[in-house]
């Protein structure tokens, strides 16, 4: 079922609500064909609505889809699998990805990115200067 439908509270085309189907136990997999961030938001929405515990809701966007398409090397954090993982924090009630690990290696870290943009005081690296609009031409 489409995760954006669940996040929006209904279908863009007037079809059945994903939340209604989830409440009836009729959803195993949540997907997003046009808005990938909706997958995490949908898992959180299911948990907030009391439809599924957060681990079960996350399984709908990770373990179950991976198994359905035959990706036996991913979808769960167990020995011998890839160890693809998102670390998510709730900020202001919104789930936000803070880290992405692919095959066990950090590929994105929000804190590192912020330090690179602002200057890493721990390493003494200076902040990157951004040109002001008035100085861009001269």
Image (cartoon, grey):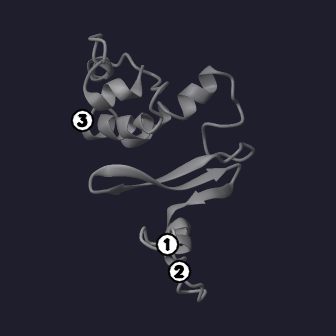
Which one is closest to the eye, mark 1 or mark 2?
Answer: 1
Outermost front residue? 138
Where residue 9 sits, quadrant-wise, is top left
Q: Earlier in the sequence, mark 3 or mark 2?
A: 3
Could you tell me which residue is drawn at 26 percent across and 21 percent down?
10
Q: Nearer the viewer, residue 45 or 137?
A: 137
Q: Residue 112 location, x and y as percent? A: 55, 69
Q: Residue 29 location, x and y as percent? A: 47, 24
Q: Residue 24 location, x and y as percent? A: 29, 17
Distance from the alpha carbon under mark 3 to that under mark 1? 46 Å
Q: Residue 19 location, x and y as percent? A: 28, 23
Residue 127, numbered label: 2
Q: Nearer the viewer, residue 110 or 43?
A: 110
The relative height of residue 63 versus residue 100 in the rendered view (above or below) is: above
Could you tell me which residue is drawn at 54 percent across and 27 percent down?
64
**96 relative position to 99: left or right:** left
Quadrant, the N terminus? top left
* Disc 3 target residue: 49
Could you tell me which residue is drawn at 50 percent across and 72 percent down?
130
Residue 131, numbered label: 1
**122 relative position to 105: left or right:** left
Circle 1: element type:
loop
């Amino acid at each position: 079922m489409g995760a954006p439908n669940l996040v929006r509270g209904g279908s863009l085309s007037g079809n059945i609500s994903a939340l209604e189907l989830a409440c009836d136990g009729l959803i195993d997999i949540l997907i997003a064909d046009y808005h990938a961030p909706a997958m995490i938001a949908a898992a959180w929405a299911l948990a907030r609505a009391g439809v599924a515990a957060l681990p079960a809701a996350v399984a709908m966007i990770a373990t179950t889809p991976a198994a359905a398409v035959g990706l036996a090397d991913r979808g769960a954090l167990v020995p011998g699998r890839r160890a693809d993982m998102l670390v998510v924090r709730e900020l202001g009630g919104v789930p936000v990805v803070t880290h992405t690990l692919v095959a066990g290696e950090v590929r994105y870290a929000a804190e590192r990115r912020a330090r690179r943009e602002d200057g890493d005081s721990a390493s003494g690296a200076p902040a990157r200067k951004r040109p002001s609009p008035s100085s861009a031409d001269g």
